[in-house]
Image (cartoon, rainbow, N blue to C red):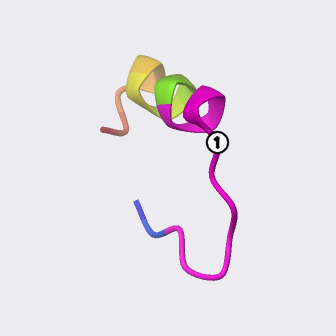
Amino acid sequence: PSYTGRVVTIAEIREQMAAGSA
């Protein structure tokens, strides 16, 4: 995923991974 210009927290990343967007 692209996180350009966006603050990504650990919770966000883990949520994405849980959604299968890793």
Tell me which residue sits at (55%, 79%) in the image: 4
Q: Give the range drawn in magenta.
A: 3-13
Q: In this view, does 3 lie to the left or right of 6?
A: left
Give the dominant element type of the magenta stretch: helix, strand or loop.
loop
Residue type at mark 1? Thr
Disc 1 crowd rating (10 Å Cα; few below 14, some 14-19, many 20+) is: few
Q: In which quadrant will I find the C terminus?
A: top left
Q: Does the magenta stretch include residue 7?
A: yes
Q: Which residue lies furthest to the left in this view?
A: 22
- Whether residue 14 is situated above or below residue 12 in the rendered picture: above
Secondary structure type for disc 1: loop
Q: Residue furthest top?
A: 18
Which residue is at the front of the view, 11 or 15?
A: 11
Q: How many numbered marks, from 0 up?
A: 1
Q: In this view, does 15 lie to the left or right of 6?
A: left
Q: In which quadrant will I find the N terminus?
A: bottom left
Tell me which residue sits at (44%, 17%) in the image: 18
The residue identified by callout 1 is 9
Which residue is at the front of the view, 8 or 2?
A: 8
Tell me which residue sits at (35%, 27%) in the image: 20
Q: Is residue 16 left or right of residue 21?
A: right
Residue 6 image offset from top left, x and y in percent: 68, 70
- Whether residue 2 is situated above or below residue 14 in the rendered picture: below
Quarter of the image for residue 15 reads top right
Tell me which residue sits at (39%, 27%) in the image: 17
Which residue is at the front of the view, 1 or 14?
A: 14
- Whether residue 20 is situated above or below residue 2 in the rendered picture: above
